[in-house]
């Protein structure tokens, strides 16, 4: 998804779920958004 779409999705999730959302830039150049509590802090 594009950066603009990821930010809009993140804002919608944050407002709906009342949680912090992390927008990330993937290796392939796309962006994504996930709830912050799903991030475990480990790297592959």
Image: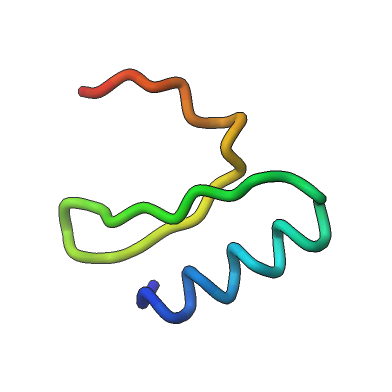
The N terminus: image quadrant: bottom left
**At 19% across and 64% down in the image, what residue appears?**
29
| Residue 35 percent location from the top left of the image | 61, 43
Which color mode does the image show? Answer: rainbow
| Residue 44 percent location from the top left of the image | 21, 23
Please indicate whether residue 6 sits to the left or right of residue 30 in the image. Answer: right
Please indicate whether residue 22 sits to the left or right of residue 24 in the image. Answer: right
Above-or-below relation of 42 to 6: above
| Residue 34 percent location from the top left of the image | 54, 47
**At 57% across and 37% down in the image, what residue appears?**
36
Please indicate whether residue 20 sits to the left or right of residue 4 in the image. Answer: right
**At 82% across and 60% down in the image, what residue appears?**
16
Q: How many marks?
A: 0
Please indicate whether residue 26 sits to the left or right of residue 5 in the image. Answer: left
| Residue 31 percent location from the top left of the image | 35, 63
Above-or-below relation of 9 to 19: below
**At 25% across and 53% down in the image, what residue appears?**
26
Above-or-below relation of 21 to 13: above
């Amino acid at each position: 998804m594009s950066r603009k779409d990821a930010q809009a999705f993140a804002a919608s999730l944050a407002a709906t779920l009342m949680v912090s959302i992390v927008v990330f830039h993937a290796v392939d150049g796309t962006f994504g958004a996930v709830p912050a509590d799903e991030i475990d802090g480990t790297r592959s």
